[in-house]
Amino acid sequence: MMIKSYYQKIAFLGIFLIILFVFQKYTGRAKEDFSDVKFISEKNVTPALTDFDPNTLDEGQWKKLGFSAKQISTILRYKEMIGGKFISREQLKKCYAISPEKYSLLATYILLPETNKEAKFSGSKNFTSTSLVIHKKFNPDLYSQTDWMKMGFTERQAEAILKYRNYLGGSFISKDKFKECFIISDENYIKLAPYLILPDKTPNHFKNYSENKNTSKSKIQYHPFDPNILDVEGWQRLGFSAGQSKVIVNYRDRNLQGSFKNTEEIRKCFVISSEKFVEIKPYIQFNPTTIAKPAGKKTELRQEKTDFSKIDLNKITFKQLLEFGFDERAAGSLIGFRNKLGGFINKDQILTTYNIDKELTQKLLSIAFLDSSGVQKYTLSDAPEEWLKNHPYFKYSADKIIFYRISEKNDKKIWKFLKLKPEYETRMRLYIK
């Protein structure tokens, strides 16, 4: 009997301790410190970034930037709360759903003025309300630069409107999208809206249309291009898919030793259909400086060993790189990178080439010389758009440069507007006059 009573006491004590533990666990939560809780998950995989206007992003595009559904909902509500449009990076940064770390990652890619003051200054200086003359309803997709100027816009404003239309894929899509053009002030939009022959709202399929606009033959804006400086993104702008573009670049850099020599070599690439080749052929322009010299006849292999102290690194051939000890992949990468840059300015650039043996490369750099006198350079205000969009150092800032130089021709001011990281600006300035 005593034993039974003993075990009952033990059991009762155990139950009491369990109840006490559970009670403390749940009532103690009020004292926990949540000050370190962040809205942005630090475990998100860093997305592949490119320039973007936060005012044009839908929920799916915000998600691709690494935001959760709740964060996206907060960002969109904040956007509506401030009037339906972000006017500056400073304003976007204040959204509490975007952590400082996330904002720092995205900042250089955001196509907005840095501060509210700059946004208002830009608007008041360059894009003031214009006295418009509108006689009848019209389709803005069919208007030329001259038509916009006749209506009352300045030459620069008319040019900017057309650039915005091209950015959308060749059509304004809807009145909502037309209103988003930064050139069109609220006052002018009120005047124009009743005359616009456009749907009021953007169609639901616009997302897919926008993502695939480069694959639509009727929407692609072809310009003369050098096939030896185009990277994957450059070929995508010509209407090829990401997979096709990678095949073309690999075919050029590996199979053809770094460059196409003629249009026939381009035609032979199996991912380029006969119809597509006919479309792009008139725009192909070869630059002699970006064509790798052929390896030559086999009999040349019996000649004396190359004196690399007399070799210019901006002219070294695929064959000479193999002779020095590079494998085919590394040699093709080096020449391909040189072609995209239009030539090396300093030897340090060569060490950043993908797929190379850095120790072997350093040895080559210590022996061979580099003549950069023939490398093409531009100012930000006169650099060709195609060159900006395809140059490895400029392509991520190309849209910003093109945007700012519409109203500003002073290079110093354009550099200031870009607000680049010092290391990015330093390497870009290598190719500036």
Image (spheres, rainbow, N blue to C red):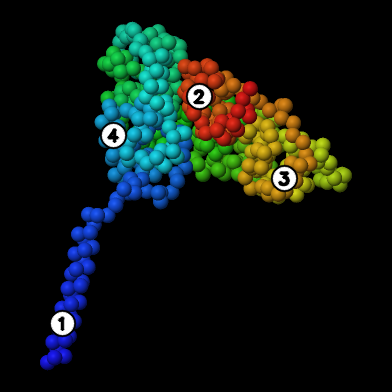
Q: Secondary structure at mark 4?
A: helix
Which quarter of the image is occupied by the N terminus? bottom left
Say whether marks 3 and 2 touch (CB < 8 Å). no
What kind of residue is marked 1?
Lys
For residue 140, say whether it is visible. Answer: no
Q: Residue at x 60, y 33 (%)?
A: 427
What kind of residue is marked 4?
Tyr
Q: Nearer the viewer, residue 284 or 57?
A: 57
Say whether marks 2 and 1 touch (CB < 8 Å). no
Instruction: Please report whichever mark, 2 or 1, sits nearer to the chain's N-terminal start.
Output: 1
Q: CA distance from mark 3 to mark 2?
A: 35 Å
Residue, far left: 1
Depth check, mark 1 against mark 4: the one in front is 1
Q: CA distance from mark 2 to mark 4?
A: 29 Å
Q: Secondary structure at mark 1?
A: helix
Residue on which the image places disc 3 = 362
Residue on which the image places disc 1 = 9
Instruction: Please report whichever mark, 3 or 1, sits nearer to the chain's N-terminal start.
Output: 1
Residue on which the image places disc 2 = 416
What kind of residue is marked 2?
Lys
Q: Position of residue 142 (x, y in %)?
A: 39, 18
Residue on which the image places disc 4 = 78
Say whether marks 3 and 1 touch (CB < 8 Å). no
Q: CA distance from mark 3 to mark 4?
A: 52 Å
Depth check, mark 2 against mark 4: the one in front is 2
Which quarter of the image is occupied by the C terminus? top right
Say whether marks 2 and 4 touch (CB < 8 Å). no
Q: Secondary structure at mark 2?
A: helix
Q: Nearer the viewer, residue 188 or 348?
A: 348
When asked about the image quadrant of residue 14, the answer is: bottom left
When asked about the image quadrant of residue 90, the answer is: top left
Instruction: Please report whichever mark, 2 or 4, sits nearer to the chain's N-terminal start.
Output: 4
